[in-house]
């Protein structure tokens, strides 16, 4: 790894060694297909999946039978949105916060294009908080579903999920919450208890990639949600395909570790993040924290360095691994849709870096990273790149 300082934990996390250990038996000893109930090999795999299901349900305080395993949060979001739309038998009417992850926005855009859906994109304030008045004003029964993320992965801004869910329910709408970025990073968010469907992902919480879940309340799962991947009828007919047992076991183990450890880690990471932001503001003239006025995830910092193109800053601090906006869009020059929704213009949005701290981050990492970013920013501003 050399001198690399990884500060991109919102993009992905390393698999915890305890998780790797928990997964090992699921590769060869207990290699069975959990749907093969007719023999011990299959039943042993089923037992491992059941245990993981209980761990995944517990982190969001739901019943194990509410958990539908998927290949990740992208698939879980698609299942929630396309699965509810498919059960309606008419075009969907929905509202979505404009700062949602692309795996929430794009399924809605597909429904608009292909199935006549009527989708409202809810604006956010300069601090990234969604407007809520519109929900009070719309007629009862005029909305099928609202999608609101628990927290934004780019800025760390935490949405008022409970408040939005309460208002949406009063109007008769279902509530879908993409909780991918909040799980394991803060105290349990009570707003999640008010939602009907929750999405999250294993690789953001020190579990393996390629596994996630949609956790859907029984009534929604049984009566309103339709599967979108059809086949052998696994996961109660809602997501066909042989279960990815090793990844599911790892996901369950990662959840079980996160429940007792995340509150302490959130405090530690929050202190590191605050130190980092203080250093940035004191070193770099005009540096601004995006979403500063909102409650934010303790590990996330999104900073604008006026006059310094973020890609150039990153290129000139090669040992510091950070991103501009979300990793999914950072290969293009398009500014982050999240920062644009918060009112930043094209150029300002391209001057923002995202730093996200994790379990392995130390105080030394923070001071070294702050100095390297400061040097890179001064170089870039000086050259006028
Ligand atoms: N939602 C959010 C908020 C995310 O940050 C991500 C990952 N960047 C996803 C969904 C997609 O998750 P996955 O990689 O598991 O498909």
Image (tube, grey):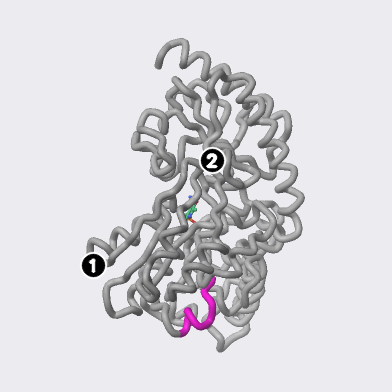
**Image quadrant where one finds the N terminus:** top right
From the viewer's perspective, tell me whether residue 2 is left or right of residue 327: right
Residue at 59% x, 54% y: name it.
182
Q: Earlier in the sequence, mark 1 or mark 2?
A: 1
Instruction: Determine which residue is flagged by label 2.
Output: 291
**Image quadrant where one finds the C terminus:** top left
Vertical side of 221 occupied by 248: above or below: above
Instruction: Pinpoint residue 63: horizontal percent, then vertical percent.
Output: 62, 77
Vertical side of 142 occupied by 373: above or below: above
Q: Which mark is residue 116?
A: 1
Mark 1 Cα-neighbour bin, 10 Å: few <14, some 14–19, many ≥20:
some
Q: Which mark is residue 5?
A: none
Instruction: Pinpoint residue 308: horizontal percent, then vertical percent.
Output: 45, 21
Residue at 44% x, 65% y: name it.
136
Between 78 and 99, the one lying in front of the other is 99
Name the quadrant containing residue 93.
bottom left
From the viewer's perspective, tell me whether residue 181 is left or right of residue 146: right
Vertical side of 40 occupied by 299: above or below: above
Mark 2 Cα-neighbour bin, 10 Å: few <14, some 14–19, many ≥20:
many
Q: Main secondary structure of the magenta part?
A: helix
Question: Which secondary structure lies at badge 2?
Answer: loop
Between 336 and 244, the one lying in front of the other is 336
Cβ of mark 1 under 8 Å from ligand 1: the answer is: no
Between 115 and 200, the one lying in front of the other is 115
Q: Nearer the viewer, mark 1 or mark 2?
A: 2
Which residue is most to the front? 137
Residue at 54% x, 71% y: name it.
215
Query: Which contiguous range is marked in magenta?
Result: 215-222
């Amino acid at each position: 790894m050399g001198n690399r300082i990884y500060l991109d934990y919102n993009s992905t996390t390393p698999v915890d060694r305890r998780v790797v250990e928990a997964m090992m038996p699921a590769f060869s000893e207990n290699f069975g297909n959990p749907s093969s109930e007719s023999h011990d090999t299959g039943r042993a795999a089923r037992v491992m999946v059941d245990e993981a299901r209980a761990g995944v349900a517990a982190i969001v305080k739901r019943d194990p039978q509410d958990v539908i395993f998927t290949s990740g949060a992208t698939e879980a979001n698609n299942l929630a949105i396309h699965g509810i739309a498919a059960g309606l038998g008419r075009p969907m009417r929905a509202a979505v916060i404009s700062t949602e992850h692309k795996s929430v926005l794009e399924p809605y855009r597909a429904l608009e294009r292909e199935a006549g859906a009527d989708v409202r994109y809810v604006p956010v304030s300069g601090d990234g908080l969604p407007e809520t008045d519109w929900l009070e004003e719309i007629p009862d029964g005029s909305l099928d579903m609202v999608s609101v993320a628990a927290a934004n992965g780019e800025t760390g801004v935490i949405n008022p999920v409970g408040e939005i869910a309460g208002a949406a329910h009063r109007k008769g709408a279902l509530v879908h919450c993409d909780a991918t970025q909040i799980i394991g990073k803060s105290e349990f968010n009570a707003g999640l208890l008010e939602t009907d469907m929750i999405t999250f992902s294993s690789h953001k919480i020190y579990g393996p990639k390629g596994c996630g879940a949609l956790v859907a309340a029984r009534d929604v799962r049984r009566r309103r949600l339709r599967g979108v991947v059809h086949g052998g009828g696994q996961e109660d007919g809602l997501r066909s395909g042989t279960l990815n047992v090793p990844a599911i076991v790892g996901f369950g183990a990662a959840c079980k570790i996160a429940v007792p450890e995340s509150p302490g880690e959130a405090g530690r990471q929050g202190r590191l993040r605050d130190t980092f932001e203080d250093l940035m503001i004191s070193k770099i003239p005009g540096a601004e924290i995006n979403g500063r006025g909102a409650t934010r995830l303790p590990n996330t910092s999104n900073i604008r360095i006026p006059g310094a193109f973020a890609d150039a800053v990153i290129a000139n601090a090669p040992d510091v691994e950070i991103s501009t906006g979300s990793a999914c869009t950072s290969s293009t020059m398009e500014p982050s849709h999240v920062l644009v929704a918060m009112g930043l213009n094209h150029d300002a949005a391209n001057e923002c870096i995202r730093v996200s701290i994790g379990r392995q981050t130390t105080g030394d990492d923070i001071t070294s990273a702050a100095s390297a970013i400061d040097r890179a920013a001064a170089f870039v501003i000086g050259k006028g790149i």
